[in-house]
Amino acid sequence: MTIQRDLIINGEHVPAASGRTTDDISPWDQSVYAQVAAAGPEDVRRAVDAAEAAFEGWAATGPSQRARIFAKAADLLEERTAEGVELMAREVGGVAPWAGFNAHLAADILRSAATAATGVQGQVLTTDMPGKLSLGVRRPYGVCAAISPWNAPFILGVRALAVPLAVGNTVVLKPSEDAPLACGLFLADVLLDAGLPAGVLNVVTNDRDDAAEVVEALIADERVRNVNFTGSTNVGRTIGTLAAQHLKPAVLELGGKNSVVVLESADVDYAVDAATFGAFMNAGQICMSADRIIVDRSIAEEFTEKLVAKVAALPSGDPTDASTVIGPQVNVRAAERQFALVQDAVEKGATVHTGGTKPDGALLEATVLTGITRDMRMHREEIFGAATAVYTVDGPDEAVALANETEYGLTAGVIAEDLRAGWAVAERIKTGIVHVNDQSVNDEPFAPFGGVQSSGYGKFGGDAGVDSFTEMRWMTVQKDGHAGYPF
């Protein structure tokens, strides 16, 4: 039976003002998995109305009470892991290990948010003014707009809203059209069941054709004071521009052209395992996925042979099958876009070592290529799918130059048993995140997460995340005597 879901506004499940709905398509069999309300600008205004009305009371709620809500939500999310695994398989084609990891890490993000609710909210400043106490006090912005992606729906959906809420903001969440349940309504259900007051979190789903209008209405509303978005660089540029036009700070975590550098000292078998995970977890549909595997020539032949054998053996198919490693892409359009990158590379001389066949619906075989050159689209564009390219280089300098040959700057991995050499390379790679003796896909709720260059700006996670979703206010008290004035 097709799931039917409404918007969530002021704690109530309500249809769109227009009465319209939109289909949520399962990527595995192209069936209609759910129908959700298709909001318009009038629904955005209703959601912001509710968030604005709830803000003062929520900001005044004691930090311990806020923390209890997030701790309970974390427990509830873990209790609903089996439901979440089924949801991710049906809605976004996520395989069971990936979906289970999503639920586990999302629960940890909620627990981290609980600690943020009770954390230090300012600092005592030095001052040259006699008798004055000078403070920097962190305060919530008010209503925050959060736009969450489909690819790691529990992790990135929770990340979009948890810390903003924990530090006293209210949120209007617009989930991806490809996962309105998994990165939106399912998470809101958990938080509301944990005791989050009505209006503190509101969810506005929409038809894909209305996305630009809905997002513009949300960001343009003068009561919305902060914006966060995780998604493609192209869309992020638009959202960043809208936020700037309305003088609103934004956190943008965007695309990546991520490298795993394998140095001469690497343990080849470990490097193969790491690179396979980094390139093909969630069928390569992670912003941190390894598009480029850059290998020192001294071990390149052995590494490539073992990588190709491992990737060729990865089971692919139905995401509800517990043995599946490579599930479908999120939709047929995505699979066709990725196949076009492979075709372009092959037509210009690249070699396919495994995979590379035309997609079956949204299912694309795991693909490994070599011989990628600068004139190929795959060299420049983010793959964001089940393909990766192996490059051979002579030494660390060439490896660093190639890793930096991109407009992006999200993450990287450097595999080396010689950790000094690995660290030296890592320091030279221009990314917001880098991991030594590990691959590019890592995440923790306590870490500052974000990129540089065309991978965005601002940070989620840890103290940096608290800074992103609060504003620092300077406050002083003339506690001793009176201030002096020149006239």
Image (tube, rainbow, N blue to C red):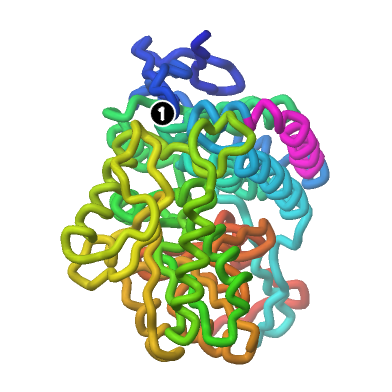
Q: Is residue 322 above or below residue 293?
A: above
How far across and how far down the image is residue 387, in percent?
A: 39, 55
Q: Nearer the viewer, residue 369 or 199?
A: 369
Q: Nearer the viewer, residue 53 or 43?
A: 43
How far across and how far down the image is residue 91, in percent?
A: 50, 28
Please give the name of the residue rendered at 49% of the width and 55% of the height, measured from the top-left corner.
311
Tell me if 132 is positioned left or right of 249 in this view. right
Tell me if 194 is positioned left or right of 316 in this view. right
Residue at image mark 1:
44
Q: Nearer the viewer, residue 290 or 257?
A: 290
Q: Is residue 413 above or below residue 397?
A: above
Please give the name of the residue rendered at 63% of the width and 88% of the height, measured from the top-left corner.
418
Please give the name of the residue rendered at 35% of the width and 55% of the height, measured from the top-left corner.
383
Q: Check if residue 140 falls in the magenta segment.
A: no
| Figure label count | 1
Type of the residue with mark 1: Val
Res. 248 in view: yes
Question: Circle 1 — which element?
Answer: helix
How far across and how far down the image is residue 412, in percent?
A: 50, 71
Quarter where residue 106 is shown: top right
Quarter where residue 187 is shown: top right
Give the crowd class for mark 1: few <14, some 14-19, many >=20 residues within 10 Å. many
Stretch of the chain drawn in magenta: 66-85
Res. 288 in view: no
Chief SS of the magenta region: helix
How far across and how far down the image is residue 134, in percent?
A: 68, 74
Please give the name of the residue rendered at 65% of the width and 78% of the height, measured from the top-left corner.
483
Q: Is residue 193 above or below residue 365?
A: above
